[in-house]
Image (cartoon, rainbow, N blue to C red):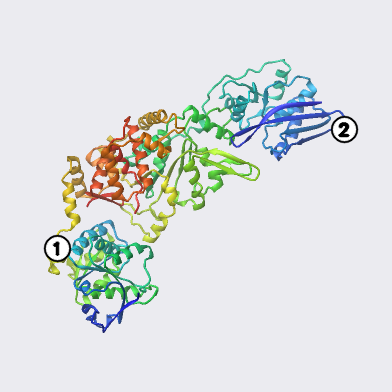
Amino acid sequence: MFLKVQSATNLGLETIGVDVEVNIASRGLPTFEIVGLPAKSVDESKERVRTAILNSGLEFPQKRITVNLAPADIPKEGSFYDLPIAVALLASVANFKIPENSLFFGELSLDGSLRHTRGGLLLALFAKENNFKNVFVPKDSANEAAVVRGVNIFPVESLSSLLSYLLNKSRIEPLEYRKEEVDTFKAKPDFDMAEILGQEQAKRAVEISSAGGHNILLLGSPGAGKTMLARALPGILPSLQEEESLEVTKIYSAAGKIPPGGSIITNCPYRSPHHTISGVGLIGGGSKPKPGEVSLAHRGVLFLDEFSEYPRSVMEVLRQPMEDGKLTISRTMISVDYPARFILVASANPCPCGYLMHPKKQCSCSEREIRKYKKRISGPIMDRIDLHIEVPVVDVKELAEDDNAKQFLEPSVKIRERVINARLLQKNRFINDGIFVNAEMKNEQIKKYCQLPKEAKQILISAANKFNLSARSYFKIIKVARTIADLENSLKIETSHIAEAIQYRFKEN
Amino acid sequence: MNNIIEINNNKYPELLKNVGKDAPKQLYYKGEWTDDLFENCLAVVGSRRMTTYGRQITQKLVSKIATNGITIVSGFMYGIDATAHKSAVDVGGKTIAVMPCGIDRVHPEYQVKLYNEILENNGLIVSEYEGDTMPAYWTYPQRNKIVAGLSKAVLVIEAGEKSGSLITANLAKKYIRKIFAVPGPLTSVLSYGTNQLIKNGEAEIVTSAEDILKFYDIGTTRSLASRCNEKLSFSGSLSENEILGQLQLEPMEIDSLSRKLNKNIQEISRLISFMEIKGQIKKENNKYYVS
């Protein structure tokens, strides 16, 4: 008897349809074989399927069983072939018709129930694109798949409940389209901006950074509050727009990072790996390439604390994603693309001992050491950072009594409102350009959207002469000025916006 | 292009010859050796670990002194030495760098840009060592003998308790040269040496470039840079003057300015940019100074 059940496999963010063909021979000794380049996890599926069927009180065919995963030349990996194999086997004994136009996907537990399986969203998207009507997924992964409209998502609890549905004995209700926020990824800010005393310039720069998607470098002595600022950042990040949301959720789905019951990620991702991370950890990789931190931070923030401590080789891999917003990971068997458009928030000390700009402590580094230390962050990376801020050490006790300092304290919620508004302006502006934020502008768009008044141009040119600005710095200032104008709801870039942007330039000395 | 001046050559500077057995037998040099370069020399020495205060004072004093035709002699080390050379070159003044290593070596090598600037501006690089001899612990004090010997006076800007600059000051005393010292804040370890020189009466206190110019018997001509600044500060608005007023009291960070003047950071940033471009103020170590 020959049976065919349809399923799919995920390669990076791509999904490829897989036919699970099961043949049950009437002759020959009872065996159970899987062919079609199965990985270990697929091969072990035999034991899970057999035990799950028996433990559900159903009959396991004692015959010569051959399972072929077609196309047979693509390596198969993962545990989600359990369900399609089991369905085919059950169909051979229970005599029901395998529903047409349907995808089956899910890992079995030994007791016959279904477990949360990674990639549910990708599968549902694949089903929609390829006109499949029904998708059967584990109940825990159903919310994730139900984000996709126009496909019936059947949440399956166990093998026996699925069997009684297929035999028309009971019903499984397909899930409505829903958006269940994944709370787990709601990066809760550790601090409110209003809790940070002083640091007016740094706070302003962080606001500009999240409004326009600009990369930012915070430079300061230990204890200046760089990390505190970065930790408060999630509180002012806007929510993801629908399109962005789907992009991000796809990556998390492929990485298996969506928890059971969760569906879509609506918050800006915020990732802060430790500086001992490997290049592959940062960028993604493996023989079946998994997304790395840069992709997990897509449309969000990648916070790299103690940036100068990152090994040079690890730091340099950031160059391509910072420039292109995506990356391609190639391995012998496979090559996958992952998007990686993130805001880089980096913090670093000004010198090896850290106290170069400290008002009280003496820096104990020699000129040579400082030069060497500054060179740890390479030019090409520096070139891609728009905002360059020196964070001074503040006397908290003194500031706590300073009324003027308190006057400038703004809660994160209020700053966030401005950021959201600025993002909205940018979204409308770039509607036909395929970009989301000012930082992504290329020269062509700068020409189009950043007309400078004559006076502003003059100021910029004299600044370029005075501070020896490179051509790239020149354009960075314009981009930042565009964001400053957006924060003020101003359609035009004014001279004052340029003047402020000049303060955040990369300072060389 | 190895140029040597032997001690019996009549081009050998008189002042240096007079220090007796401390005078090196021969001087290797790069650049153009002219007699008027050695006419009025001032040695400017100080700490390698220069503070912002030290840098400011060096720039201020040296640019004025060098504008008035006095040759600035120093040891080409980073810190005060390099700042002194640079300030002299920037105003088109004369300067002599005395190296602690062979004449063909640039030490420290990352200051090669300054090295070339000195040569391009008719300055002179001098050393008593030939070829690319490595600098050694003992060559630095040896070099100081030439620095002190060439000069009529020595100006000490920032010196710690056991600073090499004090060695130069002692040599100057031995050679009967005038010693000037810039007083520094009592809180700074780098002011200990200079303040001590003043306290002991070994050095004359310097509070302006005129103190030194008077010693060389030269009247002052105002530098080009200071004239430019005056013209620009004319356009200062009310708020700009407020900022200047604060910064004249004490250099500070932009955040402190914002709090002191009770203006939000955007407004201050915008003003500061204009003032920086106009050259009214300068940023160093994250603090703004009136320039």
Is residue A225 toward the left or the right of residue A257 in the image? left
Residue type marked 1: Glu
Name the residue tied to disc 2.
A28
Quadrant location of the C terminus of chain A in the rendered image: bottom left
From what the image shows, is residue B22 above or below residue B208?
Answer: below
Q: In which quarter of the image is residue A1?
A: top right
Q: How crowded is mark 1: few (under 14 residues within 10 Å), some or many (20 or more)?
A: some
Residue type marked 2: Gly
Q: In which quarter of the image is residue A415?
A: top left
- Same chain for the residues under marks 1 and 2 in the image: no
The count of marks equals 2
- Kindly indicate whether the residue at mark 2 contacts the one at mark 1 (C-beta within 8 angstroms): no
Residue A302 percent coordinates (x, y): 47, 41
Which of the chains bears the disc numbered 1?
B
Residue A345 percent coordinates (x, y): 43, 42
Q: At 19% across and 76% down in the image, what residue appears?
A: B176
From what the image shows, is residue A152 above or below residue A108?
Answer: above
State whether residue B203 appears in this view.
yes
Residue A260 percent coordinates (x, y): 59, 29
Name the residue tied to disc 1.
B210
Helix, strand or loop for disc 1 = helix
